[in-house]
Image (cartoon, grey):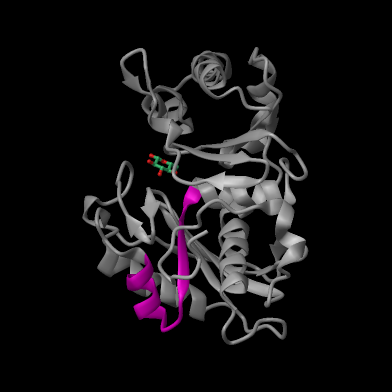
Amino acid sequence: MTSASTTSTPAPVPASSRAASSPVHSHALGVDIGGSGIKAAPVDLAAGEFAADRVRIDTPQPATPAAVAPVVAKALSSLPSLAGLAEDAPVGITFPAVIQHGIARSAANVDPSWIGTDAETLFSDTLGRPVLVVNDADAAGYAEIEFGAGKGVHGVVLVTTLGTGIGSALFVDGRLVPNTELGHLEIDGHDAEKKAADSARDRHDLSWSQWAKRLQRYYSHVENLLWPDLIVVGGGVSKKHEKFLPLLDLRTPIVPAQLRNDAGIIGAASLAARVAAERA
Ligand code: BGC
């Protein structure tokens, strides 16, 4: 694990060894940067839940690094102060792109000016405190592994998020393999997320069964490549899982995420606390 640096991508993290290094902090702050909203909440790290209501501010457009950073600062400063929240509570921030050692490396659904941006330095400088920046699906997946549908599951667990794009987070015995980007598998000549993300369902006005056919193609391909023990399906649409998960015929058990839209904030805060504890 490369957690000695403040600008390290959360490399593989063993959920199973959590008890061995108890977190220094009981609470941390999580921020979820999305295409339409920037959301922030303090997180109770033992319970894996928000310690207070989250705040949400519209994502500025265009969502360039210079425009987004002050909005993240504003979201955090709008949070009510909490007795359990230390001044130096860790901050974890999700971002919907490859984040390698703190640097954004892709921009499928975000402003292209992010590519090559040292997001951790940008946010650390703006907030005046160290932060951890992590891919949005990796953060959401980590929360599911720690507190949700993947908790205690050994072997290979794939968490996917169905939204504007398809995010993926791969865990092996609780260890994250970061930045898997399985939404961009090429299937039948197409970038998979363009056909099977929830945004494609909206864009093409697909019925649940029409969309499920696309998901079937996607998840069959993925399970034939990875042979996971469990697939967890997150993203906002997962709250309607009964409309499409029963229509899928896969050998791998496939279940809805439990933390849903809170997962990114909870996962980012938990990962930030974990890195801070390891550095302490
Ligand atoms: C991006 C991923 C992201 C996913 C979900 C994809 O287009 O490439 O980095 O995790 O969308 O937001």
The residue lying at 62 percent from left, 39 percent from top is: 172
In the image shown, does 24 or 242 lie closer to the viewer?
Answer: 24
- Please give the range of residues in magenta: 120-136
In the image shown, does 110 or 15 lie closer to the viewer?
Answer: 15
Q: Position of residue 277 (x, y in %)?
A: 62, 73
Q: Is residue 126 magenta?
A: yes
The residue lying at 30 percent from left, 64 percent from top is: 118
The residue lying at 48 percent from left, 70 percent from top is: 4
Q: Position of residue 61 (x, y in %)?
A: 28, 58
Q: Which quarter of the rendered picture does the C terminus lie within?
A: bottom right
Q: Is residue 30 visible?
A: yes
Q: Is residue 48 visible?
A: no
Q: Quadrant of ligand 1?
A: top left
Left/right of residue 132 with respect to residue 120 in the rendered view: right
Q: Is residue 196 magenta?
A: no
Q: Is residue 140 above or below residue 38?
A: above
In the image shown, does 254 or 173 lie closer to the viewer?
Answer: 173
Residue, far left: 113
User: In terms of image quadrants, where is residue 203?
Assistant: top left
Q: Is residue 236 above or below residue 73?
A: above
Q: Position of residue 249 (x, y in %)?
A: 65, 12
User: In terms of image quadrants, where is residue 265?
Assistant: bottom right
Q: Position of residue 232 (x, y in %)?
A: 65, 34
User: In terms of image quadrants, where is residue 74?
Assistant: bottom left
